[in-house]
Amino acid sequence: MKAITAAAPVAALVFAATFSAASIPAADAVAQSVAANASAGRIAGQISVTTKGKAKRDASGVVIYVVGFKQDAAKTIPKMTQKDRQFVPRVLAITAGQKIDFPNLDSYFHNVFSLSKTRRFDLGQFKKGRSKVKTFPRKGIVEVYCNIHPKMSATILVLPNRAFAITDKAGKFRIDGVPPGEWKVFAYSRHALKPARSKVKVTAGQTTPLRLAVNETKFEFKHKNKFGENYRDKKAKY
Amino acid sequence: MSHHRALNVLRRVAAVAVLLATVLVAAPAEAGRRPWIWVWDTEVLHEREVEIEQWIWEMNLGAKQSAWLWWAPVVGLTDTLELAVPVEASWWWLPSEADGDKWQASTQFETWGLSLRWRLAENDPDEAGDWVPLVRLAIKKLMGGRKPQWQFEGNVVVSNDTGALHSTLDLGFFYATRGAQWATYAFGMAYGINDAIRLGGEVFGEIGLSEERKTFTMVGPDLGFTHGRTWITIGCLIGVTDKAARYMPRLIWAIKF
């Protein structure tokens, strides 16, 4: 279990490596913007999630993403709320350049921050009804915490394109707007040591099936507050 | 080498290694909120953050020497507006007029006041861009004298980030009701060796606009260090013109809550 505390940086390194290992169609020697259009295909399937060899009842929250091409970020601004001393959702996937809104719905202060190299930020303390928006310009993984509440943690995946989806409780997903070609697909869980991976061939107007298996560890990753110190509440489980 | 002596050497090597690791390992917080001892910078606290900040410096003016203490709680009023409530005290040491071989010293409470720093860009460096302007306004009550005396201060500061190089230009104007007026100019450059350490240098000068104020220029090196909730900057300005102090070392540090 001691290895689990090192899982976060290991997962981040593996996540970063997924972009450099991406395949690029022969017709496009250099990565370029690819607009989703009617001739795109889709990838759909199911992710089976296990914890210590046993099937997990709730397989939601696994991010499936495709690498090898870039797309402009959507204009929509998804929310990562602070509610009941938790981040909702706990996993969020966006495209590089997109913004995220962090509204506080609790009746007490929160101090959302991240020390991840991909996007370091500190929202400061703000109370219920206030919200702050951040832009995420670089690809990578961003671990988000609250400087006041040690149990609060979430992960943001900043991806190179809009071809991603998050599984539902049954582990099912569907990704639309994938350009035709051969691509690498990854399934990321914030509780797994490394993403599951596969290669797919996408044809315009057709659905490519995909099934992957993800093995999750059971525990959260330990973290320190924004000053690099242990939280004062020693009894709190991270 | 005896066993005891070998152990002592090992302990010293381990202590140096731990110190180096502490200094060189990337620190969670930004490196040195102010990487120079005299040039104002453009970083401000987040809303509701609090720092206790203090500066200690000495001025060697040849026959006269002095040491100063500036102490202030600093509060983030918003994400871009910061308020400090500083108090200043000084200690003077100069030759006795009656007997040149003797020295006389005096300690006095110099000023107290309010200082506002308004960052004219997003607090987040990623959102703010490479060029960040800031305006500083301060009012101080000058202690001593029968009638209340006030000093008004204003600075316009612009910083730039190019890779690991951080540069700032600081132009100031000062007006005291007892008649003194002067302007200041300062420029600093600091290089981020890692997240914890910044090495740099600065130029600081005053232009006297009234009789009692001198015009001079000083230059010097700086070292800024950040660790957790603490930042420290140390440097020494050296006079390069006639009317400047010979040297002016300064230590500034703060603890964030």
Image (spheres, grey):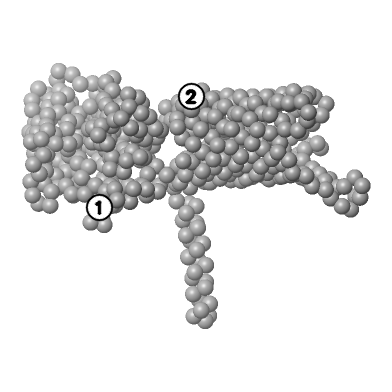
* Secondary structure type for disc 1: helix
Asked where in the image residue A47 lies, by quadrant, the reply is top left
Output the chain of dot 1. A
Q: Is residue B96 visible?
A: yes
Can you name the residue that lies furthest to the bottom here? B2
Location of residue B175 with respect to B228 vertically, above or below: above
Disc 1 crowd, CA 10 A, few/some/many (<14, 14-19, 20+): some
Q: Residue furthest top?
A: A38
In the rendered structure, the answer to whether residue A225 lies left or right of residue B18 reads: left
Name which residue lies at 21% across and 49% down: A219
Q: What residue is drawn where x is 59% and y is 26%?
A: B136
Q: Hey, what amino acid is under mark 2?
A: Ala
Indicate left or right for A226 with A194 as reference.
right
Q: Do the residues marked 1 and 2 share a common chain?
A: no
* Residue B207 pos. (x, y %): 75, 28
> Vertical placement of B180 versus B232: above or below?
above
Percent across and percent down for residue B76 are: 49, 31
The residue lying furthest to the right in this view is: B98
Residue in view at x 86 percent, y 47 percent: B95
Camera-nearest residue between B61 and B170? B61
* Helix, strand or loop under label 2: loop
Q: Chain of mark 2?
A: B
Mark 2 Cα-neighbour bin, 10 Å: few <14, some 14–19, many ≥20: some
- Percent across and percent down for residue B216 are 76, 33
Residue highlighted by disc 1: A4
Residue A64: percent from left, percent from top: 17, 35
Distance between the alpha carbons at the discs numbered 1 and 2: 40 Å
* Left or right: where A131 falls relative to B250: left
What residue is shown with label 2?
B121
Looking at the picture, which amino acid does disc 1 mark?
A: Ile
Quick check: A157 left or right of B24? left
- Please name the residue shown 76% across and 33% down the image: B144
